[in-house]
Amino acid sequence: MSIFEYNEAEEKEKIRKAEYEGGFKDGIRQGIEQGMKQGIKTGIEQGIEQTLFSLIQKKLQKGKTIAQIADELEVEPAEIERILREHGVK
């Protein structure tokens, strides 16, 4: 084996390693971005759900029916019932 062959093989290995590390870093970055987007989406959904539950509780305390609450909050009665069930009410 000559010096030129050895250097060529060594250079190819360096290139492969750099490409791998670059791809790995890109993969990590993409994973973090996707995780943050999903986390934000989930947080917003949970916030909306918690707000609805709070409003439903207040309206129930005022003696309103599920149908009245659904009409006022512009959601289906089944959605009100689901939220109450998930929070252990009724």
Image (tube, rainbow, N blue to C red):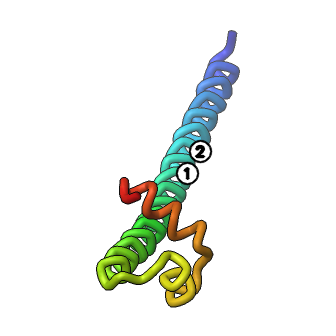
Q: Which residue is mark 2?
A: 23
Q: Which residue is mark 1?
A: 26
Q: Residue at horizontal 54%, vertical 57%?
A: 34
Where residue 72 appears, as percent x and y from the top left, is 51, 90
Q: Residues within 10 Å of mark 2 (few under 14, many from 20)?
A: few
Residue 47 lies in quadrant: bottom left
Where residue 55 appears, as percent x and y from the top left, is 37, 80
Q: Are marks 2 and 1 in contact (CB under 8 Å)?
A: yes
Where residue 56 appears, as percent x and y from the top left, is 40, 76
- Rendered position, 39 above or below 58: above
| Residue 40 visible in the shown view | yes
* 58 on left or right of 65: left
What secondary structure is found at the residue carrying circle 1? helix
| Residue 37 visible in the shown view | no
User: Of residues 9 and 43, which is closer to you in this image?
Assistant: 43
Amino acid residing under circle 1: Asp
- Rendered position, 6 above or below 48: above
Q: Residue at horizontal 63%, vertical 34%?
A: 16
Amino acid residing under circle 2: Gly
Pick out the residue farthest to the top: 1
Which disc number belongs to residue 50? none
Q: Residue at horizontal 40%, vertical 58%?
A: 90
User: Of residues 44 and 77, which is closer to you in this image?
Assistant: 77
